[in-house]
């Protein structure tokens, strides 16, 4: 029972930098959504030209603390988590036309390291301590298709993400780097780019449908997310703007493993984004940095996160 409490109350810390305390249990199993809010920001409506390969490396650093109290069983937990995630997104645009757009394929493998220490126990009694460190591959994300269309200053893309439970998972651990569940997600990205002022507004919207974790018999609810960015592309490749996201769980958790009820999570985040584009070995590489602060959280713990991203078209026509 304490193992279960540890994971529900603190595994969400794998996705936050500084978390606040609360008296709410976390929604989605272990409080971790299949989609990582904040994954997308600039140029989400653009799709690479046919015959080209685009590489984007995203590094996420998290350092989190939390104090969670469950009033029903009168149990409390204190946790500290440090986590690193490196996700490498690769998209290849074929020369095959599909619905007036070139069919593009994508893949996103992840390497993760997470260290967590937890103090937990009944209120008023001495706490018991557990620690765990896990490193290895996270869940693999496939994009069977990615299509894009251009309408003047507007650029629209659509894709489907398939989340595969390939990450390290052990039900007895207090922290995992895999969710042990499949998920499917249709997405739409829209970018408006004002050519004269070089002002960009982008939004990436998706709806995630989770399947049951067969080890824990826990079915996480469906999830809606919207990532957004507003930026100005200045001379000499400098980029200045803001980025953020909104996340809302639309259906409650269920299954025999959802012992604390059908919670629905939600959160909003906002923060600065800066970047620069310059040539490296005859390729234009764009580096971006963003720091997002979460607020208005319900049934999730609140935190901050640091993203470092480098993207580059390796070759093309």
Image: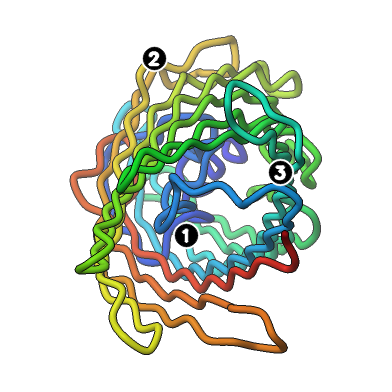
Q: Quadrant of the C terminus?
A: bottom right
Q: Which residue is mark 3?
A: 106
Q: Which residue is mark 1?
A: 79
Instruction: Give neighbour class at mark 1: few <14, some 14-19, many 20+ (Cα, 10 Å).
Output: many
The residue closer to the viewer here, 292 or 82, is 292
- The x and y percentages for residue 132 are 69, 60
| Vertical placement of residue 94 versus 198, above or below | above
**Residue at point 54% right, 44% down?**
6
Q: Is residue 270 left or right of residue 96?
A: left
**Residue at point 49% right, 67% down?**
62
Mark 1 vs mark 3: give the one in front: 3
| Vertical placement of residue 155 versus 25, above or below | below
Query: Does residue 139 appear in this view?
Result: no
The residue closer to the viewer here, 70 or 47, is 47
CB within 8 Å, label 1 to label 3: no
Q: Quadrant of residue 100?
A: top right
Spatial CA distance of label 3 from label 2 is 28 Å
| Vertical placement of residue 73 versus 173, above or below | above
The total number of labels drawn is 3
Spatial CA distance of label 1 from label 3 is 36 Å
The residue closer to the viewer here, 120 or 103, is 103
- The x and y percentages for residue 261 are 41, 17
**N-term mark: 2 or 1:** 1
**Residue at point 75% right, 32% down?**
96
**N-term mark: 3 or 2:** 3
Instruction: Give neighbour class at mark 2: few <14, some 14-19, many 20+ (Cα, 10 Å).
Output: some
Mark 3 vs mark 2: give the one in front: 3
**Residue at point 39% right, 34% down?**
205
Q: Which residue is mark 2?
A: 251
| Vertical placement of residue 128 versus 57, above or below | above
- The x and y percentages for residue 99 are 59, 21
What is the secondary structure assignment of the residue under circle 3? strand
């Amino acid at each position: 029972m304490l193992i279960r409490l540890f994971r529900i109350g603190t595994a969400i810390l794998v996705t936050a930098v500084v978390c606040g305390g609360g008296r709410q249990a976390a929604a989605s199993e272990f409080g971790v959504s299949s989609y990582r809010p904040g994954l997308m920001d600039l140029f989400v409506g653009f799709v690479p030209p046919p015959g080209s390969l685009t590489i984007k490396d995203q590094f996420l650093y998290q350092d989190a603390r939390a104090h969670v109290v469950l009033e029903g069983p009168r149990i409390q937990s204190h946790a500290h988590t440090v986590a690193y995630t490196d996700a490498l997104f690769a998209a290849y645009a074929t020369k095959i036309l599909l619905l007036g757009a070139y069919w593009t394929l994508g893949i996103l493998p992840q390497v993760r390291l997470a260290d967590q220490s937890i103090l937990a126990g009944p209120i008023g009694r001495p706490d018991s301590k557990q620690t765990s460190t896990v490193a290895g591959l996270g869940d693999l994300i496939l994009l069977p298709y990615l299509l894009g269309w251009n309408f003047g200053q507007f650029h629209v893309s659509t894709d489907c993400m398939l989340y595969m439970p390939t990450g390290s998972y052990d039900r007895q651990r207090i922290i995992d780097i895999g969710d042990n569940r499949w998920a499917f997600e249709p997405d739409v990205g829209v970018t408006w780019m004002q050519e004269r002022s070089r002002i960009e507004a982008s939004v990436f919207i998706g709806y995630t449908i989770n399947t049951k974790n067969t080890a824990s018999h826990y079915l996480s609810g469906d999830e809606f997310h919207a990532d957004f960015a507003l930026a100005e592309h200045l001379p000499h490749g400098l980029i200045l703007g803001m980025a953020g996201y909104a996340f809302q769980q639309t259906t409650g958790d269920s299954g025999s493993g959802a012992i604390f009820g059908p919670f629905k999570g939600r959160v909003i985040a906002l923060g600065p984004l800066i970047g620069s584009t310059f040539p490296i070995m005859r390729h234009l590489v764009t580096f971006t940095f963003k720091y997002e602060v979460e607020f208005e959280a319900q049934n999730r713990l609140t935190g901050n996160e640091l993203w470092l991203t480098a993207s580059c078209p390796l070759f093309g026509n």
